[in-house]
Image (spheres, rainbow, N blue to C red):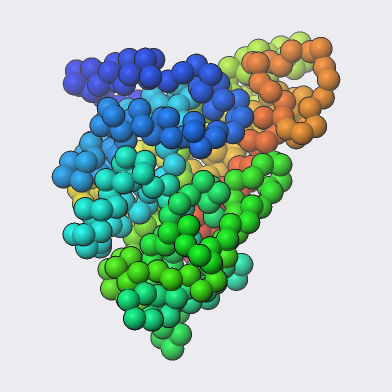
Amino acid sequence: MDLSFNEEDLAFRAEVQDFIAQKLPAELADKVRLNKGLSKADHDFWHAQLNEKGWLAPNWPKRFGGAEWGAVRRHIFEEECALAFAPRIVPFGLAMLGPVLQKFGSQEQQDYWLPRILNGDDWWCQGYSEPGAGSDLAALKTRAVRDGDHYVVNGQKTWTTLGQHANMIFCLVRTDVEAKKQEGISFLLIDMDSPGVEVRPITLIDGGVEVNEVWLTDVRVPVENLVGEENKGWTYAKYLLTHERTNIAGVGYSRAGLDNVKRIAGRAMSGGRPLIENPHFAARVAQVEIDLMAMSTTNLRIISKAAAGQAPGIESSLLKIKGTQIRQEITDLTRRAVGPQALPFVSEEVESNTPLPDAFDAGAVAASYFNNRKLSIFGGSNEIQREIYAKQMMRDAK
């Protein structure tokens, strides 16, 4: 998306480019570019680099240690990081829990947890989905019963992204079984090292281990780890989900992915001509580019609202829908541009003397395509997001 940048914006872009050039190792950028999978150490390294610079939390207020950037500056930063193939910052502590604590947490919780998120002392994961409570999150059954100065928690969470690395999990738990579904839920912060917490990895279709089951058996959680009021967790959960859905869109990373598709298709041959000149393929690329420009505008509007202290509204549902569709289309176009060599999974590399169009690893292209099938499901399935948007529009029309 083309924006009118002033001299200050252009100077900031140059500063970001210079910072990335100095601090991002080429081997780490290559791992991101080739979808090789990042280790905990990789994530921790880039987290620390940004924190030292003061750029780790662009949306946080300065009083909490954030950069408190405006919409344009955040757009520039995300775009430059994506184009340089910098690791995407794990969002659970910074982009999800952080805003919830800042708005609903006690002073003690803010003073203790927020600095630990910035310093990397805690790696957070999200305990929302359950086997019977995915898109219908309010159907969750994990129970938390008050016992003196503790809650005793029993239940199961699933699809817990990067839970194998986490030492903390923020969970939605049911504290009132008699109330309506949404009215009996609370928001708890749980230490993953507590007795009774078990993490079981789930192998995905791309062969990787990214998500987990988390079992909670008689886990004792201090009462002071309750965020906000008991039985008001649904309000906090909705606030968090609007930030999650905005983050899922990944405008900058879609921009980088689209540029990569064009680069590959410009070198891959089809019928004696570069694939990018194929009318059908070129039309698909053009449509993605148009959609991405429109989504960038919506994203900037939502970021501006968040910077003004407002929670994103139903626009975040639209952003989640379109953002995931664009990212899935980009991975499909990449797969098609690479051609037959994109067929194998990572564990099924084929032997071939034919070089790939853009030094892409065949298995990595396939893994990226299959892994991104999840985007339209997690964070609230796209079908549910359409229902949310339609219901709100009907209310507004009355």
Residue at the image point whose x is 69% and y is 23% from the top: 361
Left or right of 26 in this view: 340: right
Residue at the image point whose x is 42% and y is 20% from the top: 24
Q: Position of residue 136 (x, y in %)?
A: 53, 69
Looking at this view, is 286 or 174 the one in front? 174
Q: Quadrant of the C terminus?
A: bottom left
**274 w.r.t. 362: above or below:** above
**370 w.r.t. 12: above or below:** below
Q: Quadrant of the N terminus?
A: top left
Q: Can see residue 130?
A: no
Instruction: Name the outermost residue toward the front.
Output: 195
Q: Position of residue 65 (x, y in %)?
A: 21, 41
Residue at the image point whose x is 42% and y is 62% from the top: 190
Left or right of 209 in this view: 28: left
Left or right of 25 in this view: 107: left
**83 w.r.t. 293: above or below:** above
Q: Position of residue 251 (x, y in %)?
A: 43, 36
Residue at the image point whose x is 48% and y is 25% from the top: 85
Left or right of 349 in this view: 213: left
Instruction: Name the outermost residue toward the right.
Output: 351
Q: How many marks?
A: 0
Instruction: Name the outermost residue toward the bottom.
Output: 178
Q: Can see residue 201?
A: yes
Q: Position of residue 33 (x, y in %)?
A: 56, 24
**261 w.r.t. 199: above or below:** above
Q: Quadrant of residue 209?
A: top right
